Image (cartoon, rainbow, N blue to C red):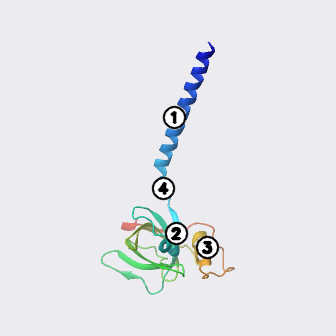
Amino acid sequence: MKSLKKQRRIQIILLASIALAASTALIGYAMRDGINLFRSPSEILAAPPEASETFRIGGLVAPGTIERGQGAEVRFLVTDGGADVPVVFAGVLPDLFAEGEGMVGTGRYVDGVFHATEILAKHDETYMPKEVMEALKAQGHWQDGTGDYGSGDYGVTARPGGS
């Protein structure tokens, strides 16, 4: 009788371990596209990501770099003061998107150009995302005490097609 109980316990533990491993694998598979790491332009140039990796870039739109292409295509440079990364976006930009202002873009870095699928613009004149603020501080281009930084969310979103 004891060996049957022991055998049943081993089967249950083995089955539970397989179920746990399978559920962990399924959760990881489901989240693979949902996690977008943030990078500053300096980090991108120091360690370029793979062309298949989707991530977020943030910084300031470099003054004098916004160029309108054919259709809804827009090209500009995003900077953290230490490095500039060219960005291409095909879609309607948020109304608050402007030169010298903060932005966060989601997309991929291919052949030295960030191809954005989404552009987020700040929702007021005092907000700056924590990650962008830290990247600008690291480059020495940030002054404290000028507003409520690092709280809230970018309130204006642009996606290709204007949705």
State the CA–CA distance, disc 4 to disc 1. 25 Å
**First in residue order: circle 1 vs circle 3:** 1
Q: What residue is drawn where x is 39% and y is 78%?
A: 75
Earlier along the polypeptide chain: callout 2 or callout 4? 4
Query: Badge 3: few (under 14), some or many (20 or more) residues near its Cα, within 10 Å?
Result: some
Kindly state the secondary structure of the residue where label 3 is placed. helix
Amino acid residing under circle 2: Arg
Secondary structure under the numbered disc 4 in the rendered image: loop
Q: Which residue position holds label 2? A: 39
What residue lies at 45% left-to-right and 55% top-to-bottom? 33
Nearer-N-terminus badge (3/2):
2
Picture layout, residue 57 above or below residue 14: below
Q: CA distance from mark 4 to mark 3?
A: 23 Å
For the residues labelled 3 and 2, say whether their Cβ atoms are less than 8 Å apart: no
Residue 20 visible to the viewer: yes
Dot 3 corresponds to which residue? 134
Horizontal relation, residue 8 to residue 67: left or right: right
Horizontal side, residue 70 vs residue 66: left or right: left
**Tag 3 or tag 4, which sits nearer the N-term?**
4
Residue at mark 1? 18
Residue 103 in percent (x, y) is at: 51, 74
Q: Give the residue at mark 4.
A: 34
